[in-house]
Every structure is written in C-alpha cells, then in structure tokens.
Image (spheres, rainbow, N blue to C red):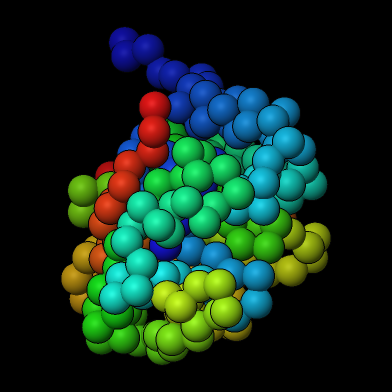
Amino acid sequence: MRAHRNLLRDGLIVPGVFRAPGSGMSVDWSKYSSPEQARLRAKNPFDNAVLALIAGEIRDKVSLPVLHKPEPENQSHSEVMLPENGEDLTEVRIKLSRIAKIAIPLSI
Amino acid sequence: MENVKEQDTSLIAELSRADSSLEFSEDVDEDAGVFSHEPLIRAKAFLLAQSKQFRKICGHFPPAPRLGPGPNGSIDLYWKEKDWELLINIPAESGKMATFYGDDYGSQKIKGSFDPSSFNYGIVPWLIRN
C-alpha cells in the first residue's frame, strides 16, 4: 500500500497511514503488482512510500478481513476491511503500524 | 535548587510543527492526509490542558506525542515509547468522543473513549511509565 509523505514521521510508520474513505482500505496484492507499480499508480508517485503487509498477519494478528477486489485497470486491487467503531479503529491502526514494513522508502 | 521547567518545550515544539504543516495543507493530492484547522485547535487545547494538569500531579511534564492527520479529518496524538505505545484520536466533529488505545506490547492494555474537552485521568498512569 502507498503512504503519502505527509503521513510518515521521521521514517516511522505511524497509525495515521491506515485510513479508508469508506470501510475498505485500498491495498495492492503483490501477486499481481510490484511495489514500484503500486507507487506509480499514485497521483504524485514520488510523494509516496510503499508499505508491505502480509495478508495472513493482518488476519491473524489484527483480526481484519482482507478481500481481493480487482478493478478493470488494476487486477491487484484489494481491501483491508477496517472497523467502523472508533475505539476498534484506533486499536487496529496501532496494530497495523506494527506489522507494516517499508518496501519503498520516500524519495529525498 | 533544581531549575524547574516552566514550559512544556517538547510539546510546544510539536504543536508548532503541526501549525507549520497546516499552512501547506491546501495544495495536496487525495492520498495526502492533511491537518484540519478546527480539530487541530481542539487537539492542542486538550494537550496543553493535559500537560499542565499532569505537571501538577506528577511534578514534571508528560512525554510529548507526535501529532498527525488521522482518518476523516481527525487528529492523531501518538506516543511510541520503548515499553509502551498509545494512540489518542481527536475526532473531526466537535462534541464527539475521542478514542484511545494503548498497550505495553504485551498483556496490559487500555482502550476507550473520553470527552477531549476535559482532563483525562485514565491515561495518566500510561504517560508516567516513561
């Protein structure tokens, strides 16, 4: 998944990275997309880092569903279903920040 | 006699940084999280009040959080320390409850909601752990 430079702090993956316009947080499945391809889909690619999360860890350690939802222009598109409850959302965002790794760091 | 700090300089520096980010928040793409002005004012008021009251109780200022844009126009207050982690989310809408979650990377955890317009005693024991 992409993380805009406004959302990263001092190279640290902060919980603010994990967000969704609805309940589904957009991610790309690495089976169909490289980290670089994911970054190039951003409006401003070089304002974005790319984070890697393992679907099994999202399901097992954070207890969130991960669904493959391919789009016509993006076969890799998937969604991590975030809770609607505010307290639960705050909890899972910390837990997601712990299992996420930086696949492509921000360009300087 | 020890020189007692009168200002929470770490917090003030972090609040200034957030103010600077606000100035650039109008010219960004949809992937970028941006600070919202009104929630940021409430987040700052909460932190300054919390810091002042904490110092009265504990004799020193609490560790300063990182401020960042949260989901849907909210503000995140985030502490990541060696032995514990705490996230408070100040909602975009005035009057809504703030939510929080923290743990010690083990079995002890804290989770709930509170009114961010008043001092919250519940999080004090976590901030003392520093």
* Figure quadrant of residue A65: bottom left
**In the visual, does B73 lie left or right of A60?**
right
In the rendered image, the vertical position of residue B74 relative to residue A29, given as above or below = above
> Quick check: can you spot residue A78?
yes
Name the quadrant of the N terminus of chain A.
Answer: bottom left
In the rendered image, the vertical position of residue B124 relative to residue B49, given as above or below = below
Residue occupying the point 44% across, 19% down: B5
Residue B28 vs residue B3, the one in the foreground: B28
Residue occupying the point 61% across, 38% down: B48
**In the visual, does A18 lie left or right of B42?**
left
Residue A95 vs residue B51, the one in the foreground: A95
Residue B61 x %, y %: 43, 34
Farthest-out residue, front: A73
Residue occupying the point 72% across, 28% down: B23
> Quick check: can you spot residue B46?
no
Name the quadrant of the C terminus of chain A.
Answer: top left
Residue B9 vs residue A20, the one in the foreground: A20
**In the visual, does B2 lie left or right of A24?**
left
**In the visual, does B31 lie left or right of A10?**
right
Residue A94 x %, y %: 38, 64
Residue B129 x %, y %: 28, 51
Residue occupying the point 67% across, 46% down: B29
Q: How many marks?
A: 0
